[in-house]
């Protein structure tokens, strides 16, 4: 079943860059939890901890696309080393300021510096895209592998961070996070053999947001992120309201676990048809599978519903990355993937805030209306952006060398689903 994954690692250097980046990706999953627990423990204020963490998320959302643009322009190794060290310096300063009783503004300043970090996950995906741009089957498997790695990191990373902060010292989680992040970033930068080449200025073209489909994915991800963020907050509140606060972690772990399982399985499938159509189907499945959360009468039922709902999340994210890699020219691939994931990040932050407000206003049980509505809005955004792809039948070349041909009429179609659109002419 997993022979496709064995073929994936046949390329020289593939195993090296995958495992080299793993510590940094684990660190990213530990970062937010480490900050919240450390600041809350040392300053006795969850409100301050949440504000410091939120400030970092805002800065990451603003700076990540710019850093990704530098990566595309100057190369991964030339950008990841200084930005990783700069970010690590900010995180180290945050550890010192939080423990030394420094003024509150120093916590915000240090975390703003720490938030200016490179998107390691996008850089790994860019390496897979460079290796297998002409092998869509293996590129699909690579995207599935990357999404599964993300899921596993975000399942285990926050747990490890919480254990370090609560059993060793409040600063232990962020300290280990800094070490992991620097180690993984420098190890990835050292893998020069598989680093994507830097393209000439004339090859970079326009902003990825001006490529048809990229903005649509980013908007869809905005609501998808709101789904994820609100599910986390509402689940914690609901479990606490029933007197079982510890169950929230298990339930959310099952949500991520369902996604990881489906991601691995999805990567073994031989996908067919337009990527835009697959994206629509996956978003629709995600919107449908989350709705039973409104009917879950107890924690056991909630756990089962979220585990099943997780089956659709990884395929949605996997297909979106495949679609971005088709739509965006290779010279701006890091920026394109980071822009879409920035939409997800903003959505998670907004969804957490809206979910918290819904719990305070309508109660924990009714708070699940928030992810339910967010899923519906994600589907609406996807339909507005990609719905016409279901009805296009004209054959014109697929952009950016996808290597697939689109057939007229009722015969099977491949490509990215934007074949019927005319070029902008700019």
Image (cartoon, rainbow, N blue to C red):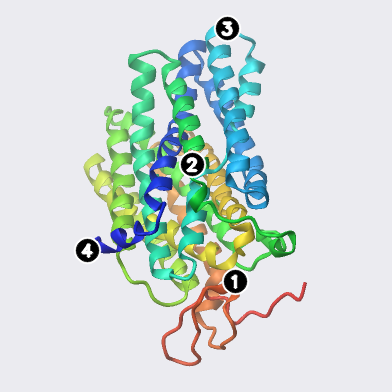
Pointer 4 or 3: first along the chain:
4
* Residue to which mark 4 is pinned: 1
* Residue 180 appears in the picture as rendered: yes
Q: Name the residue beneath numbered marker 2.
A: 188
Give the mark nearer the N terminus: 1 vs 4. Answer: 4
- Is tag 1's residue or tag 2's residue first in the polypeptide sequence? 2
State the quadrant of the C terminus: bottom right
Q: Mark 1 points at which residue?
A: 400
Q: Is residue 63 left or right of residue 259?
A: right
Mark 4: give few (<14), some (14-19) or many (20+) Cα within 10 Å: few
Which type of secondary structure does the marked residue at label 4 adopt? loop
Q: Is mark 1 on a helix, strand or loop?
A: helix
Label 3 secondary element: loop
Residue picked out by circle 3:
101
Cβ atoms at labels 1 and 2 below 8 Å apart: no
- N-terminal of the pair, mark 2 or mark 3, is 3
**Between 178 and 208, the one nearer to me in the picture:** 178
Looking at marks 4 and 2 on the same chain, the residue that comes earlier in the sequence is marked by 4
| Cα separation between marks 1 and 2 | 27 Å
**Nearest to viewer (mark 4 / mark 2):** 2
């Amino acid at each position: 079943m997993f022979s496709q994954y064995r073929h994936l690692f046949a390329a020289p250097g593939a195993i090296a860059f995958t495992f080299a980046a793993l510590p940094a990706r684990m660190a990213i999953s530990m970062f937010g939890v480490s900050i919240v627990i450390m600041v809350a423990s040392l300053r006795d204020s969850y409100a301050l901890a949440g504000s410091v963490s939120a400030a970092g998320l805002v800065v990451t959302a603003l700076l990540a696309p710019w850093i990704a643009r530098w990566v595309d322009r100057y190369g991964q190794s030339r950008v990841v080393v200084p930005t990783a060290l700069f970010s690590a310096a900010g995180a180290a300063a945050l550890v010192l300021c939080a423990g030394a009783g420094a003024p509150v503004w120093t916590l915000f300043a240090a975390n703003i510096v720490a938030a200016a970090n490179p998107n390691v996950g996008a850089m790994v995906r860019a390496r897979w895209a460079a290796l297998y741009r002409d092998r869509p089957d293996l590129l699909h498997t690579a995207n599935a592998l990357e999404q599964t790695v993300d899921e596993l990191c975000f399942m285990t990373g926050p747990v490890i961070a919480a254990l370090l902060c609560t059993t060793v010292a409040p600063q232990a989680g962020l300290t280990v996070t800094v070490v992991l992040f620097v180690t993984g970033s420098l190890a990835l930068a050292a893998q020069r053999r598989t680093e994507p080449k830097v393209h000439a200025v004339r090859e970079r073209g326009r902003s990825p947001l001006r490529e048809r489909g990229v903005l649509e994915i980013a908007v869809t991800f905005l609501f998808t992120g709101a789904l994820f963020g609100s599910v986390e907050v509402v689940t914690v509140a609901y479990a606490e309201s029933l007197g079982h606060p510890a169950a929230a972690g298990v339930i959310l772990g099952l949500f991520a676990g369902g996604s990881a399982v489906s991601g691995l399985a999805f990567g073994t499938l031989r996908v067919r048809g337009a990527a835009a159509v697959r994206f629509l189907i996956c978003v629709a499945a995600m919107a449908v599978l989350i709705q039973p959360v409104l009917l879950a009468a107890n924690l056991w039922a909630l756990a089962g519903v979220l585990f099943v709902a997780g089956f659709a999340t990884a395929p949605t994210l996997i297909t979106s990355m495949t679609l971005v890699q088709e739509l965006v020219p290779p010279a701006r691939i890091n920026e394109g993937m980071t822009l879409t994931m920035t939409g997800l990040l903003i959505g998670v932050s907004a969804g957490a805030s809206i979910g918290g407000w819904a719990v305070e206003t309508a109660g924990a049980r009714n708070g699940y209306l928030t992810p339910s509505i967010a899923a519906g809005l994600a589907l609406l955004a996807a339909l507005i952006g990609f719905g016409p792809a279901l009805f296009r039948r004209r054959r014109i070349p697929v952009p950016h060398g996808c290597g697939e041909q689109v057939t007229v009429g009722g015969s099977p179609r491949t490509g990215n689903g934007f074949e019927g659109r005319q070029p902008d002419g700019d």
